[in-house]
Amino acid sequence: MTTEHSTDLTSTSSSVLARAHLREHRQQHEELTTKRNAIDATEFHAIIPINDYPQKARWRVTNKETMVQLIDMTGASVTNKGIYYEPGKEPPPEGPPKLHLLIESNEEWRVEQAVREIKRLLVEASAAALQAEMRNPTAPSGRYSVV
């Protein structure tokens, strides 16, 4: 009778140990998944609205070459978001937001540096667009003109 009882204890102990090991494995997996998700999420971000700037200024900060330079220079992620809305138009409540840039990084100084550079580019390109319009006010604003 003692032998049967010790066999029952052994199988019960093995079952308890297996459940404890499984719980520990699940907990480690959850902790690893949480850490991985935290790495993907950035700690700092900024949003720069660009919808209302002149078309040439919007193009200047959203073209591929400028975006690559910004990312290389600052180390921050720069993403073009939203869609363009004509002056005076507002996005619908459930629609996409106005055109803007999202700057993200885990280091605040990188975000700040990217914001400063983007604002500098926007001011520079806006001034150039205004000067071009003042030199030739009858010129079409687009790339092509209809003859």
Image (cartoon, rainbow, N blue to C red):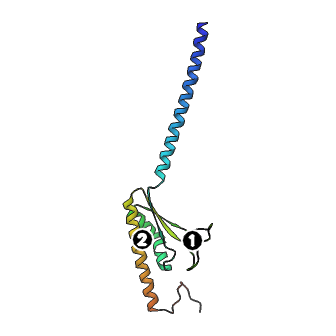
Quadrant housing the C terminus? bottom right
Extreme-front residue of the structure? 93
| In the depicted structure, whether residue 64 falls above or below residue 13 | below
What SS does tag 1 mark? Answer: loop
Within-10-Å neighbours for mark 1: few <14, some 14–19, many 20+:
few
Which residue is at a point 50% across and 45% down the rendered structure image? 34
27 versus 60 height, above or below: above
The quadrant of the image that shows the N terminus is top right
How many C-alpha atoms fall within 10 Å of the one at disc 2: few (<14), some, or many (≥20)? many
- Label count reads 2
Residue 139 pos. (x, y %): 51, 90
Q: Earlier in the sequence, mark 1 or mark 2?
A: 1
Classify mark 2: helix, strand or loop. helix
What residue do we see at 44% from left, 85% from top?
130
Q: CA distance from mark 1 to mark 2?
A: 18 Å
| Point 38% across, 64% down: residue | 112
Quadrant in the rendering for residue 118: bottom left
- Residue 22 is situated, as x and y percent measured from the top left of the image, at 55, 31
- The answer to whether residue 19 is left or right of residue 61 is right
Amino acid identity at mark 1: Ile
Which residue, given by chain and number where applicable, does mark 2 sit on?
118
Disc 1 and disc 2 in contact, CB within 8 angstroms: no
Could you tell me residue 115's position as x and y percent? 41, 67
The front one of 143 and 40 is: 40
Q: Which residue is mark 1?
A: 83
**In the rendered view, does 93 fall on the left or right side of 114?**
right
Rendered position, 68 above or below 25: below
Q: 65 and 108: which one is in front?
A: 108
Q: Position of residue 7 (x, y in %)?
A: 59, 13
